[in-house]
Image (cartoon, rainbow, N blue to C red):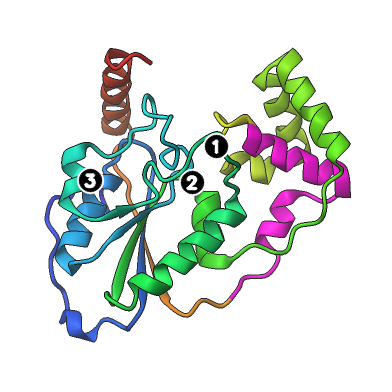
């Protein structure tokens, strides 16, 4: 689907939509995922779950492109400003909490909308996570010390070398997410990405994914405009 679409057309009777259907909207930053997810939520009279790992946190407002107050009022949203950075909120936590919430929401709606965001978190809901191994806490402490003394770039470089698949999916602005990937591979010798993709779990709902795309030059123009707005906000 091309980005910039402003109209939702009803191609079939909504009564024929299978019970429990999750529509997942994905695509690059600034392409219009939020706008489309709101239109879908309004069309189906349903609710939106954010799968953006930076929009979860109350303290992270600049540079996260959270929906505006007007957008939040246009349709019910979940997992926006829902957690504090002071409390650990892992991918596994999101999987558990999102599925629990969806179970309740599906009692009221046949269709739910999820918008990303972070591919890692969408995968957790759609495909599930394998049980992760125990971590050597001394490795975690050493990685946090490395972060404090050498900075985030050293963590990024090491993760890219040891688990490039996870590196491509993780929020690279979030050092704790990257440390999580490193501590797994350093503790077990196995990549965290292998635990995330080994076995897909059956979900009691249908999943429809909508990927947005547009001309690269136009997308870059939109991204630059968004960055200008973030700079005005104090980035």
How much space separates mark 2 and mark 3, taking CA atoms? 19 Å
Quadrant in the rendering for residue 205 = bottom left
The numbered mark at residue 171 is 1
SS under mark 3: helix
Give residue 118's mark: 2
On screen, 190 above or below 170?
below
The quarter of the picture where the C terminus appears is top left
Q: Evaluate if marks 1 and 2 touch, with contact meaning CB atoms under 8 Å apart.
A: yes
Disc 2 + disc 3, Cβ < 8 Å = no
SS at circle 2: loop
Residue 164, placed above or below residue 133: above
On screen, residue 17 above or below 157: below
Q: Name the N-terminal-most of marks 3 and 1.
A: 3
The mark that comes first in sequence, 1 or 2, is 2
Position in image of residue 173 (x %, y %): 55, 29
Residue at (16, 40) in percent of width and height: 70
Return the mark for residue 72: 3
Residue 187 on the magenta span: yes
**Relative to 84, residue 194 above or below:** below
Residue nearest the observer in this picture, 100 or 165: 100
Quarter assignment of residue 19: bottom left
Q: State left or right for residue 36 relative to residue 23.
A: left
Is residue 64 left or right of 77 when viewed as pictured? right
Q: Which residues are magenta?
A: 176-201
Upstream in the sequence, badge 2 or badge 3?
A: 3
**Residue 101 highlighted magenta (yes or no):** no
């Amino acid at each position: 689907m091309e980005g910039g679409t402003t109209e939702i057309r009803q191609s079939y009777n909504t009564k024929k939509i299978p019970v429990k259907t999750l529509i997942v909207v994905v695509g690059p930053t600034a392409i219009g995922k939020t706008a489309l997810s709101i239109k879908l939520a309004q069309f189906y009279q349903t609710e939106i779950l954010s799968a953006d790992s930076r929009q979860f946190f109350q303290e992270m407002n600049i540079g996260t492109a959270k929906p505006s107050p007007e957008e939040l009022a246009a349709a019910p949203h979940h997992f926006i400003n829902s957690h504090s950075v002071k409390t650990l909120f892992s991918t596994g936590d999101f999987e558990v909490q999102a599925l629990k919430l969806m179970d309740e929401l599906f009692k009221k709606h046949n269709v739910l909308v999820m918008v990303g965001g972070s591919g890692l978190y969408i995968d957790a809901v759609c495909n599930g996570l394998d049980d992760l191994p125990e971590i050597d806490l001394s490795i975690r402490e050493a990685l946090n010390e490395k972060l404090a003394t050498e900075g985030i770039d050293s963590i990024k470089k090491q993760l890219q070398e040891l688990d490039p698949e996870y590196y491509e999916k993780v929020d690279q602005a979030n050092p704790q997410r990257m440390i999580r990937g490193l501590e797994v591979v350093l503790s077990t010798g196995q990549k965290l990405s292998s635990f995330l993709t080994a076995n897909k779990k059956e979900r009691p709902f249908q999943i429809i994914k909508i990927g947005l795309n547009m001309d690269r030059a136009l997308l870059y123009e939109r991204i630059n405009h968004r960055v200008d707005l973030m700079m005005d906000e104090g980035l």
